[in-house]
Image: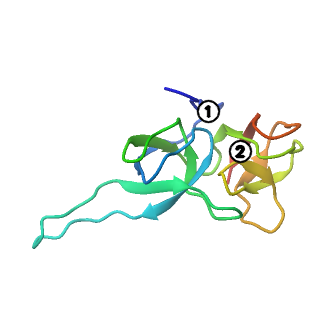
């Protein structure tokens, strides 16, 4: 697997999702299509949530575990207390709350949704940053 996200601590379980577009590992993702419990008339159902790269300042579902092409299944690390590496979008200080940039990377919280707390520091974009997810 390319660009794999390996958690430092993992108290819960991952949730399998379907990529709704190209996904980069170690970035925040959001739900783009929910579960469909099924329709007895049409026979349609979906037991997996569909995810796409998170938007700038948006609420995230979790962190992609690795790079995935559109339509591929991939585990999403989510839930409070998870400590995982997330790719930084800029310099971030240890102890700072983080939000998502337009590429799903972690940046210092400004006016977006707080997604976690940086437990390490980054000096610029493209670096692994350990984040404790909220």
The residue sitting at 58% across, 36% down in the picture is 10
- Left or right: where 44 falls relative to 48: left
Q: Residue furthest left?
A: 41
- The image quadrant that residue 72 belongs to is top left
97 over 63 or under it: above or below: below
- Left or right: where 56 falls relative to 2: right
18 over 55 or under it: above or below: above
Within 10 angstroms of label 1, few (less than 14), some, or many (20 or more) residues? some
Which circle's residue, 1 or 2, is located before the other in the chain?
A: 1
Is 62 or 107 nearer to us in this picture? 107
Position of the C terminus, as image quadrant, is bottom right
Q: Secondary structure at mark 1?
A: loop
Q: Position of residue 41 (x, y in %)?
A: 10, 73
42 over 5 or under it: above or below: below
Q: Secondary structure at mark 2?
A: strand
The residue sitting at 74% across, 48% down in the picture is 106
- The image quadrant that residue 8 belongs to is top right
Residue for badge 1:
7
Is 96 or 3 nearer to us in this picture? 3
Q: Position of residue 33 (x, y in %)?
A: 41, 64
Q: Position of residue 112 (x, y in %)?
A: 75, 66
Q: Residue furthest bottom?
A: 41
Distance, label 1 to label 2, CA atoms, is: 10 Å
The residue sitting at 57% across, 38% down in the picture is 25
Q: Position of residue 120 (x, y in %)?
A: 82, 36
Residue for badge 2:
132
10 over 52 or under it: above or below: above
């Amino acid at each position: 697997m390319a660009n794999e996200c390996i958690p430092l601590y993992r108290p819960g379980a991952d949730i399998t999702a379907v990529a709704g577009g190209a996904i980069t590992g170690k970035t925040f993702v959001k739900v783009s299509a929910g579960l469909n419990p099924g329709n007895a008339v049409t026979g349609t159902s979906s037991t997996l949530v569909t995810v796409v790269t998170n938007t700038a300042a948006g609420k995230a579902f979790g962190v992609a575990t690795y790079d995935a092409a559109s339509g591929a299944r991939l585990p999403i690390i989510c839930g409070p207390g998870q400590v995982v590496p997330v790719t930084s979008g800029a310099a971030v200080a240890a102890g700072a709350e983080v939000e998502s940039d337009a590429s799903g990377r972690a940046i210092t919280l400004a006016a977006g949704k707080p997604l976690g707390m940086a437990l390490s520091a980054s000096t610029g974009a493209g670096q692994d940053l350990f984040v404790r997810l909220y």
